[in-house]
Image (cartoon, rainbow, N blue to C red):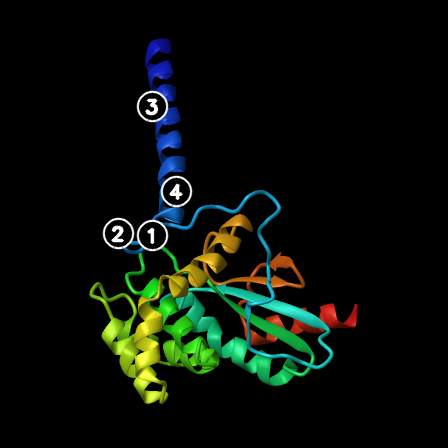
Amino acid sequence: MTRLKKNLLAVVAVVVVLAAAFGTFLLVKPDDSTTAAPPLPSAGEARVVREDSHRLTTPRSSEMTLVEFLDFECEACGAVHPTVERLRAEYGDRITFVARYFPMPGHRNSRTAAVAVEAAARQGRFEDMYGKMFATQKEWGELQDSRADLFRTFAEQLGLDMNAYDTDVQDPATEERVKADQRDGMGLNVQGTPTFFLDGERIRTPRTYEAFKALIDERLAE
C-alpha cells in the first residue's frame, strides 16, 4: 500500500509539472505558426503605459489613467467594450483612456486584427479601426481562416489610403509595434484579456458599468 501511495504521488507530481509547463506554453504560444512570440522584457522594463501608447482620450488635465490590454477577437473584450465607451463618454474630460494590444494564443485572427488596427493608426485612424473591429467581432471572431481581406475591406470603408495601408500591413515594424505592447503585458503578468490597470494598478474587471463607474468615482474622490 505504501509503495502504491508513493507511485500515485509521483504521478501527481509529474502531472502538476506538465500542467504548469503547458500553461506557460499556452500563454506564450503565438496564434500564427509563422509569427514568433515576443520575448519577455527584462525585469523592471515593462510599463503599463508608454509615450507612444494609443490614447482614446487626452484630457487637458488628466486626473487618472485607465489602461486596457485587449484582444480584438476576445469575446470578453467585446462584451466590456460598450462599458468602456460609456465610461469614455462620461469621464473623457477627466480620465486618459489607453488601449494596448494583447493578442491571445488560440485566436486565429487576433494578431491580424491588431496589425490592421496599427496600420490604420499610422494614418491617424486608430480609434476608427479599433471601433470597427469590436462592432464587427461577431462576423469574424473564432473563425479559423485568415480574415485579412475582410480587415482590408474595413480600411476601404474608412476611406484609408489603401496603398499606404497595404504597405504598412506588410511592414515588419507594424507587427513589432503590436509585439511591443504584448511584451509589456507579459512583463506585467497579464495572462488574459481584458486586463485593466487604473493609475498603474491592476484591477479586477468590474462586471457591470455601474460597478466600474463606482470604482472610478471612489478613486477620483480620494
Label 4, label 3: how far apart the Cα atoms are? 18 Å
Q: Residue 62 is drawn in which quadrant?
A: bottom right
Q: Which residue corresponds to mark 1?
A: 30
Task: Say which residue appears at 38% left-offset and 36% top-offset.
Answer: 21
Q: Which residue corresponds to mark 3?
A: 11
CB-based contact (under 8 Å), mark 1 and mark 2: yes
Q: What residue type is labelled 2?
A: Ser
Rendering coords of residue 194 (x, y %): 48, 63
Q: Does residue 220 appear to the left or right of 45 in the view shown? A: right
Q: How many marks?
A: 4
Disc with the residue nearer the chain's start (2 vs 4) = 4
Which label sits in the foreground, 4 or 3?
Answer: 4
The circle on residue 33 is 2
Q: Tell me the crowding category of disc 1: few under 14, some 14 to 19, or many 20 or more residues within 10 angstroms, Cα based.
A: many
Find numbered disc 1 in the image and state the secondary structure of the residue it sits on: loop
Disc with the residue nearer the chain's start (1 vs 4) = 4
Rendering coords of residue 221 (x, y %): 78, 72
Q: In this view, does 136 lie above or below 115?
A: below
Which label sits in the foreground, 3 or 1?
Answer: 1
Find numbered disc 2 in the image and state the secondary structure of the residue it sits on: loop
Rendering coords of residue 189 (x, y %): 53, 49
Q: Does residue 104 appear to the left or right of 47 in the view shown? A: left
Label 2, label 3: how far apart the Cα atoms are? 32 Å
Q: Tell me the crowding category of disc 3: few under 14, some 14 to 19, or many 20 or more residues within 10 angstroms, Cα based.
A: few
The circle on residue 23 is 4
Task: Say which residue appears at 63% left-offset and 82% top-offset.
Answer: 92
Rendering coords of residue 6 (x, y %): 37, 14
CB-based contact (under 8 Å), mark 1 and mark 4: no
Label 1, label 2: how far apart the Cα atoms are? 7 Å
